[in-house]
Image (cartoon, rainbow, N blue to C red):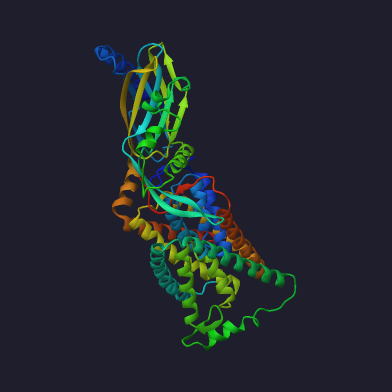
Amino acid sequence: MRGRALLRRIGTVIAFSVILCCSCIGDSHAAELAVSSVPERINITLKYSGEKVTLFGETEENAFIIARLVSVGEETTKLNKKGRRGFLWMNVKTLELTHVPALYIVQTSGALAGLPDDLLVRTGSDRKYAAIRAGAKFTPEDPEEDVLMSGYIRLKEKQGLYAIREDPVQTIKGRLFKSVFFMPSNAPAGVYQFDVFAIKGNAVIASGSTEIWLGKVGIENWVTSFAKNHGLLYGILAVAAALLAGIGVGLVFRGGPTH
Amino acid sequence: MDIYLPIAGMSVNILLILGLGALVGFLSGLFGVGGGFLLTPLLMMIGIPPAVAAASGSNQFVASSASGAYAHKRAGNVDTRLGIVLFTGGIFGSTIGVQAVKFLRLVGDLNFAIRVAYVIVLGGIGIFMFVESLRILSGRQERRKEKESKLRRLALALPFQMDFRTSGVKISVILPVLLGFGVGFLGALMGVGGGFIMLPAMIYILGMPTLLAIGTDLFQIIITSISTTIQQAFFNHTVDVGLALLLLFGSTIGAQFGVRASRKLRAEQLRILLAGIVLAVMLMILYELVATPSELISLATEGGGH
């Protein structure tokens, strides 16, 4: 654990140096925002239970920062829709929801209330998740898609996978900023991206992004690929383990196999 | 004490899962019911994807019902012969039931009728068992043997008589095959395990002793859950072996205590508890049907994933 903490500290120092260098080189492109994250790669091991990711960046003094962590690619979710039949409620339809991110977390350096709506929508940080709603696709189509989408967003917020949080971006020495994101353990393996916007006078003065990788390693990776590639054998082994365990415990409780 | 589950794709608290397993295992040993009606929603409550919760649940039922059936077997409470006959009927029933569901979905909105029918069937069975056990418990020993003579006479009159020595009944093999068929068919149609219908049917229609019915039903659940687990692992890759192993450690131990508890109770007491659970499940489904849902959408049990 101590080695890991040290590594992280070294990583932080490197990240800051990289940012400083980038900002020196990048002066001619005023719209380019230098950002970096520590770590840039998260391994899912047996003990993994989510991980903190720190985002660093550098921009003009007193700029308002909107930072967003979003999954690259999309996921498919099967949903049941409830409806009313007489005085009874029940599942009346199964829908497939596509073209939505698995994870979408926005953190800002202050209250969003003062910013104009179109700016919020453009930076994907409005409370209604307009950017996600615009892309979302239901199959088959449904007349109540807006209501269903609100339900889906609440579901994701409850799981900790969607969030819009005001204030967790800290400014250090005026130009440097950092924000600690938490990658929840139920975020699926894959590539994630940070998108960062610096805002001044109700306009985006700079933006930048960086990628982060989340993947299963070791036994987690092995079990997942075994389950995918050898489903039948996996199933038979799972059943055998269950039978052995069941009968084994039965024997133990009887004080051994003596009849 | 967290551990990451590879197929569910999230981390869980080990002690929480062990405790859930113990609870379900206890009920399974006590009543011979699968416990799926309880486990899948509980797992979904802690955030396990529905498809993974259902599939891993069936894997753990292999363990808990094996543990329970083994203990009942040693106590002489399993009629293997009858179990196999019931299961044979069950396979045909569920196969045709799955096809029937496909057909009915094409025809129209029959989910509604099915749900309502299930509530009525469960409610009827629960109330009947409750009243019957209460009457015996309260001392008026009207033996039910005289009452059920009609069905029993039919069972004796039909051809293909078979001697189920363990259960102490000699009846036509047609009856248990039909019973297995009916329960398998209803299970597939309603998407719920048939234990709640099978158990009362074994006790009241086949005339089996309560403990023997429980032991034999457990034997039947082993076979059903083995086939479900392998199918889920093969077609959907939704069996999380880590989750199942944790659950089964809890549930196999819970099942042993359940079997012990079941031996301490009188048959009528056991039946009245079972009636209570059947009625509770009925009320749960009824509540879901009547109460206005807080969300119009929910994650679907089948398929999905990333």
Residue A103 sits in quarter: top left
**Looking at this view, is A77 or B209 the one in front?**
A77
Q: Residue at x 44, y 71 (%)?
A: B90
Q: Position of residue A124 (x, y in %)?
A: 38, 29
Answer above or below: position of A222 versus B280: above
Q: Where in the figure is residue B249, as x and y percent of width and height? A: 49, 53
Q: Give the quarter of the image for residue B140.
A: bottom right
Tell me where residue B88 appears, x and y as whole percent: 42, 74
Horizontal side of residue B253 vs A239, given as left or right? right
A233 up-or-down from A103: above or below: below
Front residue (pair A241, B160): B160
Looking at the picture, tell me which residue is in the foreground, B293 or B157: B293
Location of the C terminus of chain B by quadrant is top left
Q: Residue, x 59% and y 84% (percent of image)?
A: B150
Number of marks in the image? 0
Q: Is residue A111 visible?
A: yes
Q: Residue at x 45, y 58 (%)?
A: B58
User: Is residue A170 shown above or below A136?
Assistant: above
Q: Pick out the residue farthest to the right.
A: B139
In the rendered structure, the answer to whether residue A166 lies left or right of residue B214 reads left
The relative height of residue B287 versus residue B114 in the rendered view (above or below) is: above
Q: Quadrant of residue B87?
A: bottom left
Q: A194 or A164, which lies in front? A: A164
Q: Is residue A251 visible?
A: no
Rendered location of residue A107, percent (x, y): 43, 25
